[in-house]
Image: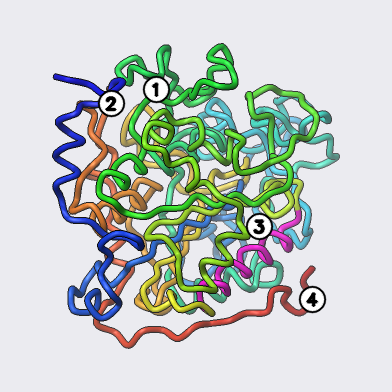
Amino acid sequence: MVRRNGWPAVLAGMLASTCTFGKGSTAPSPTAAAELGGIHRIQHVVVIMQENRSFDSYFGTFPGADGIPMRNGVPTVCVDNPVAGTCVRPYHNPNDRNFGAPHNESAALEAINGGRMDGFIRVAQSRTICAGNPNAPNCVLRVKHTDVMGYHDAREIPHYWTYAKNFVLQDHMFEPNYGWSLPAHLFAVSAWSAKCSNPNDPMTCQTDLDSPDSPEHGDRTPDYGWTDITYLLHQHHVSWGYYVDPGTQPDCDDGAMFCAPKPQKVGTPEIWNPLPDFVTVHQDGQLANIQSSDRFFSAARAGTLPAVSWIVPNNRHSEHPPALVSVGQAWVTRLVNAVMEGPDWPTTAIFLTWDDWGGFYDHVVPPRVDAQGYGLRVPGLVISPYARSGYIDHLVLSFDAYLKFIEDDFLGGQRLDPATDGRPDVRENLPALGNLLADFDFNQPPHPPLILPTHPQGGA
């Protein structure tokens, strides 16, 4: 088979011959989309990815959700504190600044502890203290008491609870992998996290959940040689944008434990911005699609959002401990308001999630779908004119479901293919994975915009 730097030319030709969607190509008009009906009413998918919160830490007391086990309002679970020789029950934590715990692959497996879900405090007590880089995935901050058993509710995160009450809350959204932010963000755009000995040959890529970056390739050589979803979007002429919030990075971009704060900007391939490190993005001439977040606000205001958008925060806006919860919520509120106030709201689905559990307690045992995960449970919200109102989705989901929705909406169901890059499975087709279509009612009267103040009363 003839390859284009490792990619089957026959596949490219096959994809190029299929129908296309997205602004700037052959996107259906709003009227045409309404006539198509069903999933194709959604012409704009917006994925907002925040940082480091478990489901129970944000929605563990949300009415009707699979939250913290309680009897008469008192938690019935108690997690071992090996240092104190006692156990700790989940408790309300009103603090705006949290600290969490290590959250790499080994920390995830230790917290899960074979399904006992009792290793969270032990993980926080046993890892390295890293004052030089507190966001490193195997570090814990120097604090007197771990706060991994603490949870927030509508008192601290009123807007998130308001979105859950008015749209869709997903209470079985799992991080797609065991471990920290970088593999989670790789799964979000490609359904895999791997290390490639030769990035120009995708068949040399092998699963790696700890350190998929390869510093030995040098700063000018992309590290990731397998297929990401933008490859398929490009072949189908579907518009996309990856929007980066300028500021500082949350972590060392080479995975090191210590580093001085580094700037986060559009062209910097790093943990929250992996697409500049994909060979396909370079080969397809799509680097310009990676833009500053101010371009997202402009596109939302003008009604020129691409068909698919991802938005990542800077460290301050991220909710990644020790960043303030209130500041992250305000950032997300600005993003959601921008979409709702713009012309594209009637045809948009916003998927809001958090990239990993950040060390915080969660009581639900993750289903084991393959050797990579699923990882621990994280919050998930669907905000759309066609989202079911006040609906709690109990289906098993992961970030793979976002890719599946995008593929079904814009790509005619085309999947990322193991035959082209050696990935172990088609993640979007795993039997355990639910379908996000369950979160929509395309026959209901569309929800009007729900504009919230950026800073709620009593907030930051």
Q: Which residue is mark 2?
A: 424
Earlier sequence position, callout 2 versus callout 3: 3
Q: Which mark is residue 151?
A: 3
Earlier sequence position, callout 1 versus callout 2: 1
Residue, x 63% and y 69% (percent of image)? 334
Q: Is residue 339 left or right of residue 89?
A: left
Which part of the image, by quadrant, shows the C terminus? bottom right
Nearest the viewer among 306 and 460 is 306
Residue, x 35% and y 63% (percent of image)? 23
Q: Which mark is residue 284?
A: none
From mark 4 to mark 1, how far is it between C-alphas?
45 Å
Are there few (<14), some (14-19), or many (20+) residues within 10 Å of tag 4? few
Q: Nearer the viewer, mark 4 or mark 1?
A: 1
Q: Nearer the viewer, mark 2 or mark 4?
A: 2
Residue type marked 1? Thr
Residue type marked 2? Pro
Which part of the image, by quadrant, shows the N terminus? top left
**Residue 329 on the magenta span:** yes
Are there few (<14), some (14-19), or many (20+) residues within 10 Å of tag 1? some
From mark 3 to mark 4, how far is it between C-alphas?
18 Å
Earlier sequence position, callout 3 versus callout 1: 3
- Check contact, mark 2 vs mark 3: CB within 8 A: no
Q: Nearer the viewer, mark 3 or mark 1?
A: 1
Residue type marked 4? Gly
- Check contact, mark 3 vs mark 1: CB within 8 A: no
Residue type marked 3? Tyr
Residue, x 43% and y 47% (percent of image)? 174
